[in-house]
Image: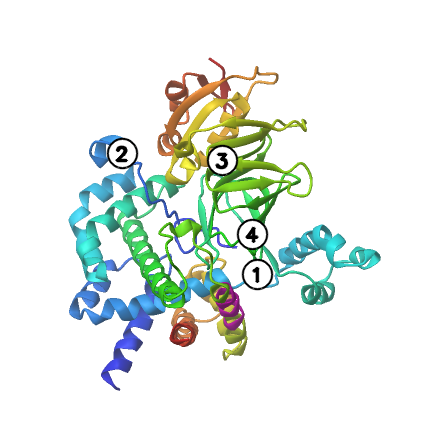
Amino acid sequence: MPSELLDGQSVRDESAGGIIAGKGTMADSLPESGVHAAFLHHRAQLLRFIAARGGGADAEDVLQEVWLRISTAQSGPVANPLSYLYRVANTVLIDRYRARRQAVLRDRAWSETQGGSDIAVSDAPSAERIVLARDLARAVEALLARLHPPRVAAIFRRHRIDGMGQRQIAAEFGISLSTVEADLRIAYRALAELREQFDAG
Amino acid sequence: MQPDEQLREEALAWAVRTLDPAFADWDAFTHWLEANPAHAAAYDRIAAAAMEAGELSPAPAAANDVQEASTIRRQVGRRWFAGGLAACAAGLLAVGLWQQATPDLYSRQTAPGQVLAIDLGDGSRIHLAGDSRIELDRDNLRFARLERGRALFTIHHDEANPFRVEAGGHELLDVGTVFDVRDDAAGFSVAVQEGAVMVDPHDVKVRLDAGDQLAIAPGSDRMVVSEIAAADIGTWRDGRLTFASASLAEVAAELARASGHRFITAPGAPRGSLTGSILVDAVRRDPASAGALLGVAVWRQGDAWMIEGP
């Protein structure tokens, strides 16, 4: 069960609307804190990162989403506010990539069946898509079970599901940090290939 | 090494490093991204697959999961076992057997102050408010049981296979929908922002359309249906709490859930009638500010914040 809020790996706030909308500047809508102050101070640096990360034309939108997330999801003091902001921005960009990919898949599956409706929420879900999500979950399970050494799957779960840091995992398993990294590379590579097979249909 | 393969190796290494909570060398990562526009896309593919797999994959069978599984088993036992079988002792073996015969249930829960977005994969989404717990079924994506707290459901409607929610002993059937469900110490409520919801379709059959809210006070079985501005529903997801004729108990429960601070009301507090809107972030930083913003008195009492009516 993911519980590490700051990691942002699955605690995602996907609010699309507006605390900020209709307000004055970002700065005067909320009280200052370490993270908010760092945001305002390092805005240009974050924009550069977002652009390099492929955010391009949407960089300002992405930045606004980062602001929203830090305004709604912050749970306590943050040790390194700038690093935290980078992490949130990175997660926003990964989420956007995932949403784009889902939309492409959906369009492909439904291009011929959907007629007049333009309201996403009222569109009927694709039976295939439901099956796809379930199949993918099962395929992930099967893939993790196949990975060698078996420690790889355990380390992946500890990291991505329990949210434990790589250094702590190294200590728990009694292995070096570089071994943990190598194991995670094995898992990530296999998972990326699996997902590519799914996307290819 | 082929250029493509080298790029992939580098992207893998960066994905592993950057997804670690302790990663801090974002400048070096930025430099790598800027070196080649293809880097970002390669990184996205790997990082997205890793994050997605973490969300799809169930927690490993640790000791506390046996406890959790046995709880779930009790709840579904009636439906899935013919009587006595359900009473057999919990244990790893029993859990293993049970998993073959029952829905593939799993739970997600939040701490106070969190909001968790759960993507059901078909475009349907659930936002789980703080201090809440929900149970989902991997084998039936059209089902959710809100065990406690609050959730906003944004559901892709499917006439043939409606989405079903169990909460507070009631059953809700979507008729094409965005709706908010709450079940906590301050009572049970359902509010419909878009579409319609059928409450207890096999029993009282109350249909709620957009802008309708159904509430049941704690300890009561009386359903009260009232109107609510559709725009005020589910605003907690965006970091804003909106109250319309809310009781002090409801306000305290909502503030606690969203901010992570403990809010309490005096025993026997009158059923107030508070209306207002408040940014969660402000309350998170300064719990006492809720007083001024909502026109109530708020003061510290031990580790909690006492709210007293207007």
- Distance from label 3 to label 1 (Cα)? 27 Å
Q: Is residue B308 above or below residue A102?
A: above
Along the line of sight, the residue nearer the viewer: B243 or B171? B171
Along the line of sight, the residue nearer the viewer: B132 or B102? B102
SS at circle 3: helix
Q: Residue at x 22, y 63 (%)?
A: B28
Labels 2, 4: front one: 4
Q: Earlier in the sequence, mark 1 or mark 4?
A: 1
The three-letter amino acid code for the residue at tag 1 is: Arg
Q: Residues within 10 Å of mark 4 (few under 14, many from 20)?
A: some
Q: Residue at x 20, y 53 (%)?
A: A59
Q: Which mark is residue B257?
A: 3
Magenta span of residues:
A130-139
- Distance from label 2 to label 3 (Cα)? 22 Å
Residue A165 forms part of the magenta stretch = no
SS at circle 2: loop
Q: Are marks 3 and 4 in contact (CB under 8 Å)?
A: no
